[in-house]
Image: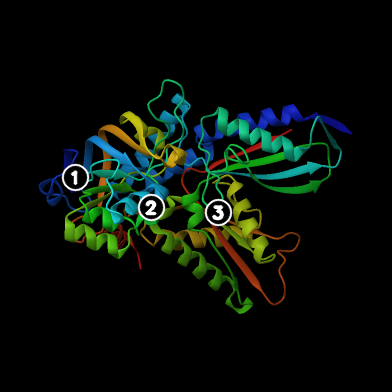
Amino acid sequence: MAEYKLQTPLSDEDVSKLKAGDIVYLSGTLYTARDAAHKRLVDLILNGEPLPFDLQGAVIYYVGPTPPKPGEVIGSAGPTTSYRMDSYAPILIEHGLKGMIGKGKRNQDVKEACKKHKAVYFGAVGGAGALLAKRIKDAKVIAYPELGPEAVREIVVEDFPVVVVNDIYGNDLYEEGRKLWAKQ
Amino acid sequence: MRRVHYKDIVKAIRDTIIYSTTHLSEDMHKALQEALEKEESIVAKAVLEQLLENAEIAASEEKPLCQDTGLAIFFVKVGSDVQIEGGTLKEAIYEGTRRGYEEGYLRASTCDCFTRANLKDEVGYNLPPIIYFDLVEGDKIEIEFAAKGGGSENGSRATVLAPAQGKEGILNFVKQVVSDAGPNVCPPIVVGVGVGGSFDYAAVMSKHALFRDVGTPNPDPELDAFEKEIQEELNKLGIGAMGMGGTQTVLAVHIETYQPGRMCHIASLPVAVNIQCHSSRHAHITI
């Protein structure tokens, strides 16, 4: 297992060196989106309309933060469960998305899209919302403010800690980790 | 007849919500420390260390432990010798919930289940809560509160087994549920199991089982042994902290049955499994 520091947007070269189980510290811009925002992003692509941010090399963080207190950049901001975005992720990957951050299993379609178009699924520690918020240096809503916690935010992170769960070679950390430690 | 004012109940609930969503409870803290000591996988150990560090940051900055501050769940026992002045108990719980979530900068996570529109304007900030009332003797109001996140709720299941399936059937069902949920429910988890009663009540008991402090034995010796047996079996699955592989998947199994008599219908064996993520935010207030 290797450790890397990477700057977003991610390139094919960046994601090609990553293997399931590697620890990555991400710096740069991430975009936040959950189910409701994903549905709208995919609708825009299907209608040939422009997206609220550039998808090329982008990393989307599946998060719906708590509201910031006065003076805070963001509230608690840990990952949400990723499978709810599975039906939307492949089309975004096809259009340039290079990374997704969440928690929990992805379906076969997402894993195949990661292999075919060179994209990576990262896991962040669920329930570590206060700790992860410290790595977020700036946040602003750039689309769908009416969605509240589910709005699309542009956030700037510094050394945001994630682990590679699904790489471009078809490896899956959850399956491998479990196999390694199962006792039956 | 003892008189309790509406405003005092509102304040107690508000304060409890803010405190319990920003401070990891003692029992969970101890359980995570013990899991860290027992865990053999380096990756899982690193996750557990992050969770303990997260708890420290959350407490010192009074920031929610997890961004999913959940649905507000209440189990309330009302003494027959208590009279509430200035409003009803239900109104006080609603108002305490709204104020706790809004003034504590917690997330409003309630929505219309069809349109998915957030209910914060139409019904109220993170309203409505889910409340189970029970009438008891005495002049106190006992309120148990949990902020229950959606991720672990999504991995929960209920069924009705045939009586012949017995304990083995219960064990297999729990194992299947935890195995299927895998990393999605934020392990290490506490597993609440409701056995008996009716189809619906098994689920209620599986949720109420999560209020018992981790490390407290089941008062029924047979069930206490069964809880430990199930926990041992579940930890053989190898899921580990956040599903990255490891030996410490389940911090505790808590079984609850319908009293008196561990009752159920002669034809059925209802079983429900309610999963609680490691961010178990539960509290107890006596008014």
Pointers 1 and 3 in contact (C-beta within 8 Å): no
Q: For the view shown, which residue lies furthest in the right direction?
A: B1
Q: Do discs 1 and 3 belong to a common subunit? A: no
Can you say whether A179 is above or below A150 in the image? below
Residue A66's x, y, as percent? 46, 35
- Circle 1 is placed at which residue position? A57
Q: CA distance from mark 1 to mark 2?
A: 20 Å
Tell me, for residue A39, which label it has, or none.
2
- Circle 3 is placed at which residue position? B113
Given residues B232 and A32, the one toward you in this image is A32
Residue B214 falls left or right of residue A57: right
Q: For the view shown, which residue lies furthest in the bottom direction?
A: B164
Subunit bearing disc 3: B
Q: Residues within 10 Å of mark 3 (few under 14, many from 20)?
A: few
Q: Do discs 2 and 3 belong to a common subunit? A: no
Does residue B287 appear in the picture of this structure? yes
Q: CA distance from mark 1 to mark 3?
A: 34 Å
Q: Residues within 10 Å of mark 2 (few under 14, many from 20)?
A: some
Residue B10's x, y, as percent? 69, 31
Residue B215 falls left or right of residue B9: left
Q: Quadrant of the N terminus of chain B?
A: top right
> Label 2 amino acid?
Lys
